[in-house]
Amino acid sequence: MLIVSDALIEGNKTLTLHPALLPWHKKLEFRRRQWFSCKDKTPLEWYAAIVDASPAVLLATQCSNIPVDTKQCWVASPYHSQLGRDQVRVIPEGLFPWCAEDAIWLCDVLNPLLGEEGMHLLRVGTALLLTCCDPMDAQPMSFARVSGKTLPNRHPEGSDGGRLMRLVSEIQMILHNNQPPHRSGQSEINGLWIWGESVWPAAASEGMPTVATRNPFLQAVADGKDANMTITEADRLPDLLKPEAPLPVHLLLAGEDYVVHLTKSYFNLFRHKTWDTSSVKDEEKLFAALRRL
């Protein structure tokens, strides 16, 4: 199975494929299609949804130094942004280079500020986890709705939505003139998007499937040994699948709140040249089918 988390993008009054998928277009257009509605998800979220777990809990269960007074955990996604005339655009996660050295540096820089709020930023492999001893009541959008798009200009829902956004703004100011020297020539780290909250402590999932990926956050929780499932962003797909290689039996192309499930059809000689949705089923049916597979 192959899942591409941002394969579908807005086209001219319809959906179209991400440009990074161009080498596979013809192969994909002959596949049988089944459409689902599905909220946009990062690769880590896709994995969490398949195993029926919280993204933050998946990270937390891989972390050995969570403070004992932790009541809540969050995923903390770093990003590079570009300032426009009236909006701030975030470059796609798949184009943002990130490594363990970056995560160590960011924890060292931000933890003095976060400690004043009863929070702590922890490195989990190459991923980042934010812990809170005083839970925040806020429901920010998933990083999947920020990556490759624009930062929201309003507070998230919840009584602490304003507090969370003030914290995000303070982090942006700290990073404005403070960058790691080892990233010279790479995209700057402009901010940290805090999302995917969960209460802590929480039980760990069992029987975790292996998965191949180049996403730094998913790599922190999923073993890639002998994997028969791949979850990736479109920009990282060429590192995982060569255009001349056979396609997996099951492909899921996601984006813009839709997913199309592509399967082999030996009797279908019709080529679908557009990506128009049809007979759309709901997200619950999608994940029920994925768990059976």
Image: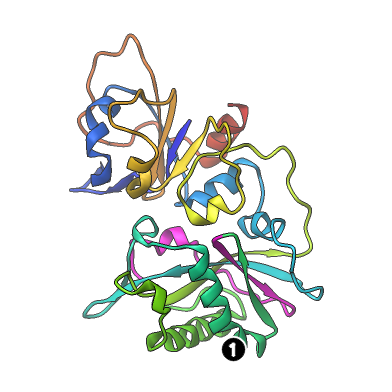
Residue ID at (60%, 42%):
223
Residues packed near mark 1 inside 10 Å, few (<14), some (14 to 19) or many (20 plus):
some
The quarter holding residue 252 reads top left
Where 279 sits versus 4, above or below?
Answer: above
Q: Is residue 240 left or right of residue 221?
A: left
Q: Is residue 143 magenta?
A: yes
> Residue 227: x percent and y percent?
55, 33
Q: For residue 132, which quarter of the picture?
A: bottom right
115 versus 199 height, above or below: below
Magenta residues, as a range?
A: 126-151
Q: Amino acid at mark 1?
A: Leu
Label count reads 1
Q: Is residue 281 left or right of residue 113?
A: left
- Give the residue at the far right of this rendering: 68
Q: Is residue 85 above or below residue 13?
A: below
Residue situated furthest top in the rendering? 267
What secondary structure is found at the residue carrying circle 1? helix
> Based on the displayed image, in which of its 4 quarters is residue 177 positioned?
bottom left
Q: In this rendering, does residue 279 appear at all?
A: yes
Identify the residue shown where x is 54% and y is 51%: 218
Q: Nearer the viewer, residue 176 or 148?
A: 176
Instruction: Please give the residue where the numbered disc 1 appears in the rendered image.
Output: 113
Q: Dividing the image into 4 quarters, which one contains the C terminus?
A: top right
Image point 54% across, 50% down: which residue?
219
Q: Position of residue 140 (x, y in %)?
A: 53, 69
Could you tell me if residue 190 is visible in this image? no
In percent of the image, x 60 and y 37: which residue is there? 210
Secondary structure of the magenta portion, mostly? Answer: loop
Residue 169 position in % (x across, y down): 46, 85
